[in-house]
Image: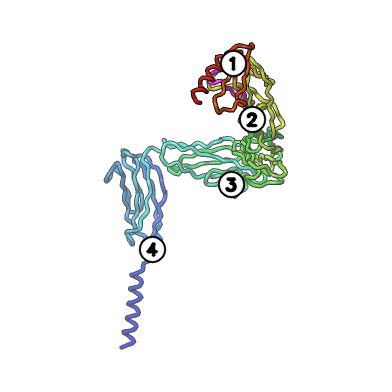
Amino acid sequence: MKSLVVAASMFLCVALSAIAAPAAVSLSLSPQNAQVALGGQLQFVVTVNGTSDSVVIWSVTGAGCSGITCGMINDLGLYTAPATAPSPATVTVTAISLADVTASASSTLTIGSPATVSVTVSPNQVVLATGGEQQFSATVTGTSNRSVTWSVSGIGCVGTSCGSISPSGLYTAPSSVPSFAAITVSAVSVANPAKSGSALLVVQSASSVSVSLTPKSAQVASGGQLQFSASVSGSTNPAVVWSISGPGCSGTGCGTITAGGLYTAPASLPTPPNVTIKATAMADPSASAAAAVALVAAASVSVSPPSAQLKPGAQLQFTAKVSGNSSALVIWSVSGSGCIGSACGSISASGLYTAPAAAPNPPVVAVTATLLSDPTKSGSATVTINSGSVVGISISPTTAQVGVSVASGAQASHFPDRKIGKEGEQGSMAKRWLRRTEKKC
């Protein structure tokens, strides 16, 4: 009897455990984000995981409809669209597991004429070398679902013999020319699989693709920029991949370059200060061109003399010293806060400055030398223009005689008689001084 009770208890525990921890149920529904014509039908397929009970409950809902105005779906998942599209013309088809009503899957359905959906592929004609790459793009109109499925096809194509294409549309040509060089790249609308677009692609020998690069050599100052241009021939794909390398640098230590070929030199020069700019054809990775770049210290400009004073109309020769650049050509200019144009004076191409006829207010102008090869680099000198007036000093009287009376107790030796001017004349200045002295004494 005890054995029977123990066995019954164990069976009950196992059963309760099974009830307490049921397997997780999940659903997957296809197609996703589809489109159906007015009054048309679309078959949905649901997969139920985690239970042997595959029965589901179907429903259709929409923001612009209710009941049969959203369409109908039967127990097998066959959806029938309404004769009139709701507004908005989208509905949601949902499948709920009967075994676990918390498990469900949904798909968005656009109701409308499938003829409104169209797909175009760009570029539509491409010539590629073996092993080359080409990025395709698909434009889908007539539906909110822009997704497409890419594929490659051609006469005699087996597997990847005609190349391959990624879900994002990046095509990679095969390593050898296929028996029939013309290949079709197709993009099929997910919303309406009956609609697709295609492009014609020809795979040819890699030896026919070449790349040219300009400039082929250049000099760039630290932190400076230079635009490179690459041209691809022998392929309809003009795209290139840019790269930078150098014996004394790596990564951004060699500088950076954009997808458009704009090179920016590093702020600190590597040792040796030389880098190579390389452009590789996407159509043929074996085709490339390179340019040699010599990196130099950033240019600086100084003007001598750094400051000066001039009278109106006077001239002064200025000189510019350029360092860190092989080109010393500068553009001279004159400016001031109190003048414009010739009112600030003028300066020749050689740096000879001529002050204006009248001093500006304030009477200070700047003489600037700007580097021709890099307008961001310049140096300046300050010029103060004097008004040109003459300062005079007059003394009156021009001659005088001073006599001194020494009071009692004073030191006569400190006040000797002085004669100024004609002998015998008394200076009025001396008289005034004597009267002041007597009063003090």
Label 3 sits on what residue type?
A: Ser
> Pointer 2: what residue?
374
Q: Which type of secondary structure does the marked residue at label 1 adopt?
A: loop
Which is in the foreground here, disc 2 or disc 4? 2
420 left or right, relative to 439: right
Mark 2 to mark 3 CA distance (whole Å):
48 Å
Nearer to us of marks 1 and 4 is: 1
Mark 1: amino acid: Ile
- The numbered mark, 2 or 3, whose residue comes first in the sequence reads 3
Helix, strand or loop status at disc 2: loop
Q: Measured from the top left, where is residue 72 in percent x and y?
A: 31, 47
* Quadrant housing residue 101: bottom left
Quick one: label 2, few (<14), some, or many (20+) residues within 10 Å? Answer: some
Q: Which residue is mark 3?
A: 164
Q: Residue at x 50, y 45 (%)?
A: 149
Q: Mark 3 or mark 1: which comes first in sequence?
A: 3
Q: CA distance from mark 1 to mark 4?
A: 111 Å
Which is nearer the N-term, disc 1 or disc 4?
4
Q: In the image, what residue type sits under mark 2?
A: Asp
Compared with 88, 345 (above or below) is above
- Residue annotated with mark 1: 393
Distance in Å between CA atoms under marks 3 and 4: 38 Å
Part of the protein shown in magenta:
357-368
| Left or right of residue 61, residue 241 in this image | right
Mark number, residue 24: 4
Going from N to C along the chain, the mark reached first, 2 or 4, is: 4
The reply to whether dot 2 and dot 3 touch (C-beta < 8 Å) is no
